[in-house]
Image (cartoon, rainbow, N blue to C red):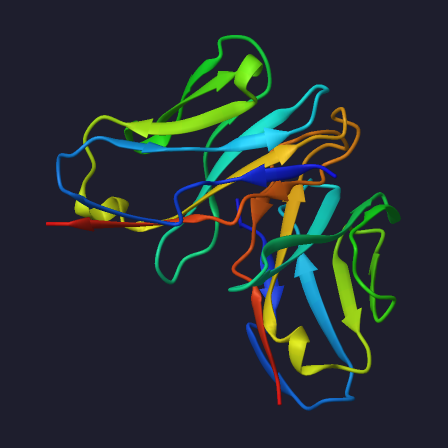
Amino acid sequence: AQSVSQHNHHVILSEAASLELGCNYSYGGTVNLFWYVQYPGQHLQLLLKYFSGDPLVKGIKGFEAEFIKSKFSFNLRKPSVQWSDTAEYFCAVNANGGATNKLIFGTGTLLAVQP
Amino acid sequence: KAGVTQTPRYLIKTRGQQVTLSCSPISGHRSVSWYQQTPGQGLQFLFEYFSETQRNKGNFPGRFSGRQFSNSRSEMNVSTLELGDSALYLCASSLGAKADTQYFGPGTRLTVL
């Protein structure tokens, strides 16, 4: 069965530290990849997405992610986190050849940034 | 442009009752998907509708059903509620039919007592 793994469940960082959140998926075909963020008390928002082309994608608020097909990975990065980045981050995969909009989500990573 | 709206935002029901949740997608979006979010299981796909047709269904019992209307608004229904149905139910809309970016609503928080 298709699945998405986020290995870091809880991450605590100090402001200005660098961030990398791991995401791996299990699907051998064409995938579309997403990172969503859920700030406290707010709804899910799209951070960035990869459909095709340059495997390094840039999103909002200084986030970027790299698609490495050989590793089935789509890790999220940010060079310097801020207190306002405290949130839960979800990796999601559309893994049915792009035929529908169904997303499979990872279990999420809760990021706490200490001022 | 207004975002995805969901009503009601909060709902308290008792076991055995049924519930209907509503979702209005972003204007012009024709695809609506529903997800269940719980602390233990995370975000799980329920079903997807496009042009009033259910295109995908997740691994949920038949007590969970949904439909989409001609104006793209969608409803989901849960019958014979169980305690384990307590969750945040999220609706997401997309412009197109295939692998499009989904925009999420604020969710309906269902509590089953």
The answer to whether A12 appears left or right of B67 in the picture is left
Query: What residue is rendered at 85% in x and 51% in y?
Result: B70
The x, y position of residue B87, in whole percent, is 59, 70
Asked if A79 appears above or below B57 in the picture, the reply is: above
Give residue A51's quadrant in the image. top right
The answer to whether B101 appears left or right of A90 in the picture is right
Q: Nearer the viewer, residue B64 or A108?
A: A108
The x, y position of residue A73, in whole percent, is 51, 24
Asked if A28 appears above or below A96 in the picture, the reply is: above
The answer to whether A84 appears left or right of A15 in the picture is right
Q: Nearer the viewer, residue B63 or B27?
A: B63
The x, y position of residue A11, in whole percent, is 29, 47
Give residue B63's quadrant in the image. bottom right
Query: What residue is rendered at 63% in x and 49% in y?
Result: B92
Q: Residue furthest top?
A: A53
Query: What residue is rendered at 58% in x and 38% in y?
Result: A4
Q: Nearer the viewer, residue A4 or A59?
A: A4
